[in-house]
Image (spheres, rainbow, N blue to C red):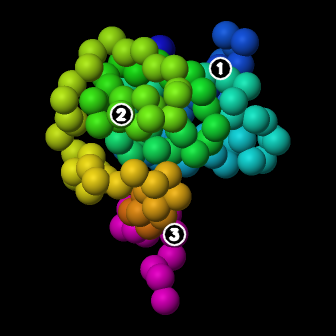
Amino acid sequence: MRPGISLEFLIGGREVFTSSGKWLHPLFDLERYLEETGTDGSAGEVHDRIVGRGSAFLITRLGIRRVHAGLLSRLGKDVFDRRGITCSWDLLLDEIECRTEGLLREVTDVDAAYRILSERAEAARRRQGVLPPAG
């Protein structure tokens, strides 16, 4: 991956989407891109710098079937393994030191994980002033 890029989505080896965002925001941005362009997630593959359990749930939900991670947690790999998603990595760790990883440790349902992650992402955008306060 190029410097500064945290996530790439490729179709046929051609880069069609990139993000330099942090945390899970690039995957939520990819979700919007797929919806807006009508692109089928299973048509491409994701290259992501860091993939933990939260990322793995989001990637799974997007229908993506191939993933390469710079750093992959075993908790994320477990999500891929249970759903038959092909994954490769540069470095495999037991766990990423991240609150999200711990929060989702016992979650197995993709939709339940998505609800949790969506709520956390919205709260983060509100704290950053990207969204108006709730209420």
Quarter of the image for residue 73 reads: top left
Q: Is residue 36 left or right of residue 62?
A: right
Q: Who comes first in sequence, dot 3 or dot 2?
A: 2
Expressed as whole percent of the image width and height from the top left, the position of residue 120 reads 39, 63
The residue wearing badge 1 is 10
Compute the Cα span from label 3 to label 2. Answer: 33 Å
Between marks 3 and 2 in the image, the one whose residue lies nearer the viewer? 2
Quarter of the image for residue 38 reads: top right
Q: Is residue 97 left or right of residue 70?
A: left
Q: Residues within 10 Å of mark 1 (few under 14, many from 20)?
A: some
Q: Residues within 10 Å of mark 3 (few under 14, many from 20)?
A: few
Position of 125 relative to 21 (above/below): below
Q: Is residue 121 visible?
A: no
Expressed as whole percent of the image width and height from the top left, the position of residue 96 reads 22, 36
Position of 75 relative to 132 (above/below): above
| Label 3: element kind | loop
Q: Which residues are magenta?
A: 122-135
Q: Who comes first in sequence, dot 1 or dot 2?
A: 1
| Closer to us: 63 or 109 | 109
Per the rendering, the mark at residue 78 is 2
Outermost residue, bottom direction? 135
Between marks 1 and 2 in the image, the one whose residue lies nearer the viewer? 2
**Amino acid at pointer 3:** Leu
Q: Who comes first in sequence, dot 3 or dot 1?
A: 1
| Closer to us: 64 or 82 | 82
The residue drawn where x is 69% and y is 34% is: 41
Expressed as whole percent of the image width and height from the top left, the position of residue 30 reads 61, 40
| Label 2: element kind | helix
The residue wearing badge 3 is 131
- Mark 1 and mark 2 in contact? Answer it, CB < 8 Å: no
Expressed as whole percent of the image width and height from the top left, the position of residue 82 reads 44, 35
Residue 134 forms part of the magenta stretch: yes
